[in-house]
Amino acid sequence: MTRLRLLLIGWVILYHLDLTLGVTQGLPWLRPVLGVGYLGVDGFFLLSGFALWLGYGARPPVGLAGTRRFLLRRMAKILPLHLLALVALAALVGLAMALGVAIRDPERFGLGDFLLQLLLVNAWETTSRHSWNYPSWALSVEWAGYLAFPLVLAALLRLPRRLVPAVPLLAFAGLWALANAVPQIGLNHTVHLGLLRFGLEFCGGLALGRLATEGRLRPSLVLAAGLALPLGLALRQDALTVAGLAALMLGIWQHAAWQAEPARPDLLLRLGDASFGVYLCWVFIEAALVGLLRQIDPGLAGRILLMAGGFLANLLAGWLACRFVETPAHRWILQRAAPAPSGRLARSAAE
């Protein structure tokens, strides 16, 4: 499942690289895949709900203490890198302004938008434009999902067994309606309707998690549903493609249940772990590419090389961010928040 995160983040980054470099203008046969790379984010939303069911379906957060522990773990995971990336971007923008470098749409970098993004409410229908570290819109809706998770999970646990299949069916029906409301956009809704897009997929992923762990999804059915992925890409139907991504997620989980974990994490696993860092570091790779394109016109071959180099640079930046910021900060916060031992236990620990 962690390796699937690498596939999804790779698709998203290649999509953004193409927006910057325009490779598919010269290679239009790549457009049916690269042109909808934003759907990798939908895969993450599904996976988020599915993984949270695997982690908490059998031991849901109970009461204020349980909810607090759950939210603390989520905050420790996402906030340090989010804050560092935002501050670093603010420093970069300030430096560019001081040096007189032309900034496209400088109104995107206002104080109001900075505060919205700082508090992770920038995709709660609070603004109509992308600003600052704009990929954080997905982090903003994820944070909303974490806040609602204890209540959503409790409702799903109370739902009668016979009604559970209706949840993913209704979720994908909602995605179909959302994708076809504005065909030119499909499911590429972000600061506007991004919260709805996320909510449908998050709840769908949770319900699929319950169905999967209860053994109610036959592998043959999952395999057949996987055909929705190439079919959705061929027909340019985003909701159908997302259904195929859900089947891919379920198929990998079912296959992994029969496989032994490797003794040591391989490169794909490490990069999958770093997907959050890769996503938040994209804006710095984009800034470097935009600056370079202002100086030269590399032609199609050069743009392809820049896409490959930018992709590798983004993976490296994300891995470094995960290795030296995300993981140690997460551990430090949880250690600081852990209750101190008391009484006889404290004396035994000291001895």
Image (cartoon, helix red, strand yellow):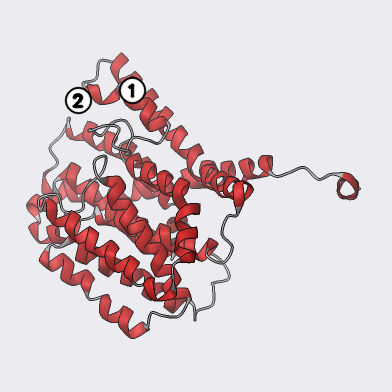
In percent of width and height, residue 118 lies at 41, 30
Indicate the quadrant containing the N terminus: top left, top right, bottom left or bottom right.
bottom left
Q: Quadrant of residue 92?
A: top left
Residue in the image at 28% along x and 31% along y: 131
Q: Residue 338 vs residue 46: left or right?
A: right
SS class of the residue under badge 2? Answer: loop
In percent of width and height, residue 81 lies at 47, 39
In percent of width and height, residue 338 lies at 70, 44
Task: Classify 1 as above or below 192.
Answer: below
Task: Classify 133 as above or below 67.
Answer: above
> Which residue is under mark 1?
112
Q: How many marks overall? A: 2
Going by the numbered disc 1, the residue's amino acid type is Gly
Q: Nearer the viewer, residue 221 or 316?
A: 221
Residue in the image at 52% along x and 65% along y: 57
> Which residue is under mark 2?
105
